[in-house]
Image: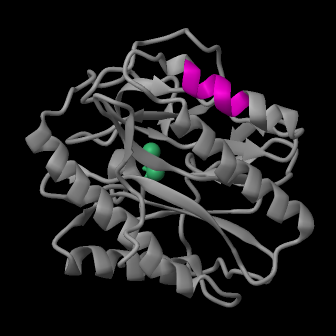
Amino acid sequence: MNQLTQAPQPLVLLSSRELEKMRRACQLAADLLNHLEPMVQPGITTQALNDEAERWTQAHGAKSAPLGYHGFPKSICTSINQVVCHGIPSPRQILREGDIINIDVTPILGGYHGDTSKTFFVGQPSERARRLVEVTEECLRRGIAAVKPGGRVGDIGAAIQEYAEAQGYGVVRDFVGHGVGRQFHTAPQIPHYGQAGQGEKLRPGMVFTIEPMINEGTWKVKVLADKWTAVTLDGKLSAQFEHTVAVTETGVEILTLPCALG
Ligand code: MF3
Ligand code: CO
Ligand code: CO
């Protein structure tokens, strides 16, 4: 996700030919998450998830966008429990029963970035973890449902914020969705909070991510000394789901939906 402070690359509208390339990259991203899912078990290290993601990505003729991006040291982001985003895989970090972990992948295929993430349960979740993760996935669903040509960027954040806060949760402000295509992060920024009817108009050909980070407690976060790992200020849980979507003539297309046929 984009940091709000970062000067964004210009917004790009994709032609139908370019959109076709985006579809391929995004399908690969969705397939990669599916591929990693069965590895999410107690005892595995986040480094092992990283290494399999890197191997699989290369085997499919793609590159891992996070690796070396603004100095990020690994191929995927792995964010456990109170980690909001940008967790760095490590051989010293072992998944434990009851953890929640967001895995965020972004392969580059044919020059285009497919960006998607999902929060997984390690073994059996606690009731509070399950509810947070379910609400966060519903936030993404409602954000996507708010996308239509002629609508506004603010419609998306308003839909997410209204639902999340009604459930008693906090919506992270410091990281937002972003335009994506040949570049990893472009305009427009897509906040997961805001006001309906405000912000940039949504137009066919716009491709961006929606990636709400929802916190059990306060929305406030801090970044650790490694300069990447963002954690909740109160140490409570955080969950995230992300899809890359395209605005179409009639509505929205989710580009990173897993294919039913695998
Ligand atoms: N995939 C993240 C996003 O959703 C960005 C990760 S940037 C990295 O935008 F450098 F941390 F990899
Ligand atoms: Co993103
Ligand atoms: Co991502």
Is 159 magenta? The answer is yes
What percent of the width, then of the height, locates residue 55? 30, 81
**Where residue 187 appears, x then y in whole percent?**
35, 24
* Residue plotted at (54% across, 36% down): 145
Which residue occupies the foreground of this view, 230 or 219? 219
Q: Quadrant of residue 122?
A: bottom right
Image location (x, y in percent) of residue 229? 61, 52
* Residue 224 shows up from this direction: no
Which residue is at 67% across, 33% downward?
160
Q: Quadrant of the C terminus?
A: bottom left
In the image, 2 versus 204, the foreground residue is 204
In screen coordinates, is 222 left or right of 107? right
Question: From the viewer's perspective, is residue 54 above or below residue 195?
Answer: below
* Residue projecting furthest to the bottom: 43
- 7 to 160, vertically: above or below: above
Check residue 205 for magenta coloring. no
| Magenta range | 155-161
- Relative placement, left or right, of 215 versus 244 is right
Within the image, what quadrant is residue 92 found in? bottom right
Inspect this view and state whether residue 137 appears: yes
Instruction: Point out residue 2 in the picture as x, y percentages from the top left corner.
Output: 47, 35
Q: Residue at x 26, y 21 (%)?
A: 10
